[in-house]
Amino acid sequence: MIIRDATEADLPAIIEIYNAATATRISTALFEPVTVEERLPWFRRHSPNTFPLWVAEVDRRIAGWLSFHEFIRRPAYRGTAEISIYVHEKFRRRGIARRLLEKAIADAPRLKTRALVGYVLGHNEASLRLFEGSGFQRWGRLPRIARFEKSERDLVIVGRHIA
Ligand SMILES: CC(C)(COP(=O)(O)OP(=O)(O)OC[C@H]1O[C@@H](n2cnc3c(N)ncnc32)[C@H](O)[C@@H]1OP(=O)(O)O)[C@@H](O)C(=O)NCCC(=O)NCCS
């Protein structure tokens, strides 16, 4: 497996993984699939030396991705980044998310990031365990703020300081 910066040509594969996860109602608060065109501005907000978007490639297929986002646009939060991780269903439980996350932690100093945070729906056990396994703690829980068709879900904020 290799991890590299994403290019615009990777966007359809990135979106495909994202949309498949959206449909489960476990990992995103979106209801409808997104299109490549809609996500282009999101893609272009990334930059390899500040807020990277990485893809994990296995046998030349995009198996997963990790993105950095600006946390809150205020100077005091400049050293904090929000991260999201998605892995294709076919490639799960092989350590791909773990390796992406470990790279985010390792590269954080280079990116001038002192803290990483993730927003995870409270019933997303896989993701909570993933983050906790890499030293993240539960820093906050916003109760029942995500409303789906038949349920209301908590949003958990996981975080980790970088030494
Ligand atoms: C969460 C997700 C990224 C994990 O990806 P993955 O590549 O399968 O994860 P890994 O194989 O690296 O697993 C790392 C750890 O995560 C946890 N984990 C992963 N999948 C799990 C599952 N289905 N159930 C419980 N724990 C799980 C485990 O602690 C695992 O460590 P272990 O294998 O030693 O037990 C993947 O399930 C996914 O893409 N889900 C949909 C998107 C999402 O929810 N993203 C998080 C929102 S930011």
Image (cartoon, rainbow, N blue to C red):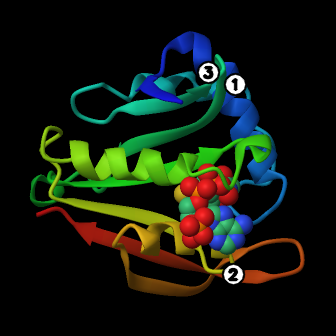
What amino acid does circle 2 point to?
Arg
The disc labelled 3 sits on which kind of residue? Answer: Leu
- Across the whole image, how many numbered discs are drawn on residues? 3
Classify residue 159 as left or right of residue 42: left
Locate residue 143: give its quadrant.
bottom right
Q: Are marks 1 and 3 in contact (CB under 8 Å)?
A: yes
Q: How far is mark 2 from mark 1, CA to CA?
A: 28 Å
Mark 1 neighbour density, 10 Å: few (under 14) some (14–19) many (20 or more):
some
150 in relation to 23, above or below: below
Please tell me which of labels 2 and 3 falls first in the chain: 3
Task: Give the structural element (helix, strand or loop) at label 2.
Answer: strand
**Residue 17 horizontal side relative to residue 10, left or right:** right
Q: What residue sits right under mark 2 in the picture?
A: 153
Mark 1 vs mark 3, CA separation in Å? 5 Å
Residue that badge 3 annotates: 11
Q: Residue tagged by mark 1?
A: 13
